[in-house]
Amino acid sequence: MVLTMVCAGLVMTACASKESKAPADEKEDLAVETIELGSEEALEAEVPEEAPLPEPEPVPEPIPETEDIPEPVAEAPEEAAPESDTGEGYTVESIAETKMYATETVNIRKGPSKDDYDSVGKLKGNAEVTADGKVSGYKGDGSTWYRIKRDNGEAGFVKADYLTAEKPADASDATVVTVGDAASQPAAQDAAAQLLAQQQAAAAAAAQQQQAAAAAAAQQQQQTPVVVGGTHNLNGLMVNEQEYQYLLSRWRFAVNDGNGTDQQVEEVVLHHSAGDLETILKAAGYR
């Protein structure tokens, strides 16, 4: 080892003395030779270790551009379909409670058909009712019916042709005569009894008027002597003034409530034949 180093030192000295004389290209050759003569340890000592390369900084990945995502549009709530009730062969569409009025006396039925459903009562003209449902086209017949609230709380159906939303001047509360409804039967019976009583009273008044006229004629007959023949020709029957006045008195009540003139009453008398008039006069004692 020592010997090697000595030899190397001699060589380097020789080379240094030659450098001043040798051209530049010869100096390069000498340097190469010197390196070749050196030991491996010297070469290792003279060659500096390469510094480790710095690790490259990580390049951040590009952030992808995000597309504008539209905000979700809230769907409009669907309009609620009108409530409906289904009957046998028909559907009742519920409507807001509406005041309606009968245009004339009309039947109230169990369902929206006069052929398939019985009447459960009657609604008088101008009566006010509340409708809360409608049936259109029962079995395709194109008709329209309204469901109404009856007085007993049950539902009934009236054809739309007989109802109107326009309030008449003489509107009244609903007056319903219900078939088989025990609650409404007494009222109907009372109304019928009142009507019958009025008719009987009118008939009694007419009978009393006739009796009074007959009594007055009989009294006049007793006070006036009977005279056959006269100056009035009634359908060929000649009557005197007393007979004429008696016949007028029998029918005077039938003309203008008893206020008719003799000529007007005579027109009524002439509706009877001469034979009938003579029979009346004989029955009254004039002949």
Image: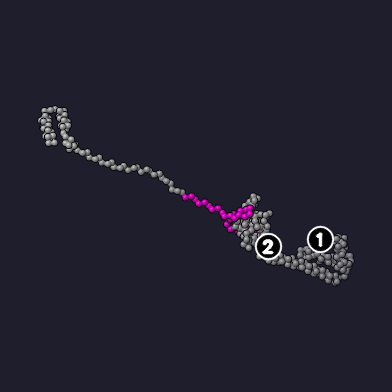
| Three-letter amino acid code of the residue under disc 2 | Gly
Colouring scheme, one of rainbow, by chain, secondary structure, one colour: one colour
The mark closer to the camera, 2 or 1, is 2
- For residue 96, what is the image quadrant? bottom right
Q: Considering only order in the chain, which callout, 1 or 2, is on the residue closer to the N terminus?
A: 2
* Magenta range: 74-102
Task: Give the image location of residue 10, x and y in percent.
Answer: 11, 32
Asked whether 113 or 221 is in front, the reply is 113
Is disc 1 placed on a helix, strand or loop? Answer: helix
Q: Residue at image x 84%, y 70%?
A: 218
Res 252 visible: yes
| Residue 249 percent across, percent down from the top left | 81, 66
Identify whether 35 is placed above or below 272.
above
Q: Secondary structure at mark 2?
A: loop
Residue ID at (64%, 60%): 127
Q: On the picture, is 202 further left or further right than 7?
A: right
Quarter of the rendering containing residue 281: bottom right
Query: Along the line of sight, which residue is nearer the eye, 47 or 6?
Result: 6
Q: Position of residue 220 (x, y in %)?
A: 84, 70
- Using the image, tell me which numbered label, if any, was put on residue 267: 1
Residue 90 or 173: which is nearer the viewer? 90
**Foreground residue, 30 or 38?**
38
Badge number at residue 18: none
**Is 81 displayed left or right of 256 in the figure?**
left
Residue located beneath label 2 in the image: 180
How many angstroms separate mark 2 from mark 1 (CA)? Answer: 51 Å
Quadrant housing the N terminus: top left
Residue 46 makes an appearance in the image: no
